[in-house]
């Protein structure tokens, strides 16, 4: 477990429950553990972040720091947790990646904004695997960003954008 490898004593987590939370919630402290929602399992980095937060809150409770609440108690406890963190919440570029899919679907195939380097250097290419199985590639000319989506024939597919192979480091070859 990553928390143990980072030096945490995880013995205070006796109960760990996966449950259905509304989408914006990742975790909730329980008296002897935590309940985690689907958002906590988005990636290993997010899971580490959420488990660390719940563990630090359990440690605060065990030390008697969360017994009485005043006007600023919650803010102070959260500040302490954030200062101790070893696992920061990763920044997601999912919205930027979805915008690439939307742009390709709208027929914009060149000069798209790269989620990695921030430049308008992403181009869209296609690989046809069978009559009804296509891969859509998004490749940046300025950095090593690449993304692939698969599905049916893309709306703006054209044979001049079809590539038979993707070469080393995601560069398109014919």
Image (tube, rainbow, N blue to C red):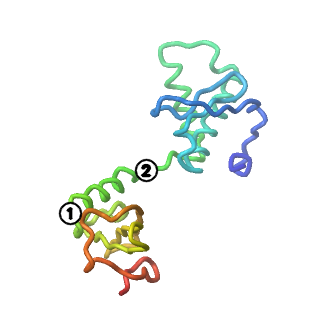
Q: Which residue is mark 1?
A: 107
Q: Is residue 69 above or below residue 143?
A: above
Assess disc 1: are there few (<14), some (14-19) or many (≥20) residues with their C-alpha within 10 Å of its C-alpha.
Answer: few
Q: Is residue 58 above or below residue 70?
A: below
Q: Position of residue 117 (x, y in %)?
A: 34, 65
Secondary structure beneath label 1: loop
Residue located 72% across and 49% down the image: 1
Q: Position of residue 162 (x, y in %)?
A: 32, 78
Instruction: Locate the C terminus and report the quarter of the image it occupies.
Output: bottom left
Q: Which residue is mark 2?
A: 92
Residue located 33% across and 54% down the image: 96
Query: Most extreme residue toward the front, as rendered?
Result: 131
Structural distance between the alpha carbons of marks 1 and 2:
25 Å
Place residue 156 in its image quadrant. bottom left
Assess disc 2: are there few (<14), some (14-19) or many (≥20) residues with their C-alpha within 10 Å of its C-alpha.
Answer: few
Residue located 42% across and 77% down the image: 170
Secondary structure beneath label 2: loop
Q: Which mark is residue 67?
A: none
Foreground pick, 23 / 2: 23
Foreground pick, 121 / 151: 151
Foreground disc of the pair 1, 2: 1
Q: Is residue 43 above or below residue 23?
A: below
Foreground pick, 117 / 171: 171
Residue located 56% across and 26% down the image: 77
Q: Position of residue 130 (x, y in %)?
A: 42, 73
Question: Left or right: 94 with respect to 14?
Answer: left
Q: How many marks?
A: 2
């Amino acid at each position: 477990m990553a928390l143990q490898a980072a030096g945490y004593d995880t013995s205070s987590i006796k109960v760990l429950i996966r449950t259905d939370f509304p989408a914006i919630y990742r975790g909730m402290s329980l008296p002897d553990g935590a309940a985690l929602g689907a958002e906590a399992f988005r990636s290993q980095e997010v899971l580490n972040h959420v488990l660390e937060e719940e563990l630090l809150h359990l440690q605060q409770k065990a030390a008697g720091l969360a017994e009485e609440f005043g006007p600023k108690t919650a803010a102070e406890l959260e500040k302490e947790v954030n200062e101790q963190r070893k696992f920061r919440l990763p920044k997601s570029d999912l919205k930027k990646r979805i915008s690439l899919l939307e742009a390709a679907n709208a027929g914009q195939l060149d000069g798209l904004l790269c989620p990695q380097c921030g430049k308008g250097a992403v181009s869209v290419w296609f690989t046809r695997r069978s009559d009804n199985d296509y891969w859509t590639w998004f490749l940046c000319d300025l950095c090593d960003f690449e993304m692939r989506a698969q599905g049916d024939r893309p709306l703006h597919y054209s044979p001049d954008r079809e590539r038979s192979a993707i070469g080393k480091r995601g560069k398109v070859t014919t």
